[in-house]
Amino acid sequence: MTKTERLAAIFAVAFAIIYAPTMDYNWTAATYHPIQGIWQFGRAPPLGGGSPAMYWYGFVITSALGAGVITALAALVPDKMLDRVPWRSLTWIATICSIIYIGYVLLPYATKT
């Protein structure tokens, strides 16, 4: 793997690992109100007028910032140390585990009667 491919895999693994608890604990960097077209910093309650508060964009921003920091730190690690890790396999494993975790967290919403 080239260094760029390795760093892309590290970003993907970090993003998947950070995204799941970010969504579970509602650690959002921004809230978007689509009807009003308003962005707010952090977690904000829905505004009046039937506008939903969309937190997904904030989850993606939070996860991307965290994964970017981890990737930048990994770029400082010598290549010989990073060559030992099976990044392609780890990318799939982290993503699948993250999906399973999110499915488990959302299960009560799907089974609510």
Image (tube, helix red, strand yellow):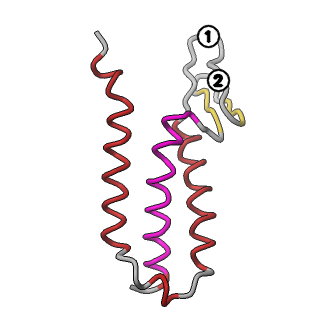
The quarter of the picture where the N terminus appears is bottom left
Residue on which the image places disc 1 = 49
Q: Is residue 107 left or right of residue 43?
A: left
- Of 57 and 18, nearer the camera is 18
Estimate the x, y position of residue 51 in percent, counting from the top left: 57, 17
Front position in the image: 33 or 8 = 8
Q: Where is residue 42 in the image (x, y as percent from the top left)?
A: 69, 35
Residue ranking furthest to the right: 41
- In the displayed structure, does residue 3 sit left or right of residue 33? left
Q: Where is residue 46 in the image (x, y as percent from the top left)?
A: 62, 19
| Residue 72 sits above or below residue 64 on the image | below
Label 1 to label 2, Cα distance in Å? 9 Å
Q: In which quarter of the image is residue 52?
A: top right
Under circle 1, the secondary element is loop
- Contact (CB < 8 A) between labels 1 and 2? yes
Secondary structure of the residue carrying numbered label 2: loop
Corner quadrant of residue 16? bottom left
Residue 17 is a magenta residue:
yes
Residue found at x 65% / y 17%: 47
Q: Is residue 66 above or below residue 75?
A: above
Q: Residue at x 61, y 27 (%)?
A: 33
Please, what is the dominant secondary structure of the magenta stretch? helix
Q: What amino acid does circle 1 point to? A: Gly
- Whether residue 66 appears in magenta in the rendering, the answer is no
In the image, the segment drawn in magenta is 4-26
Query: Disc 2 marks which residue?
Result: 36
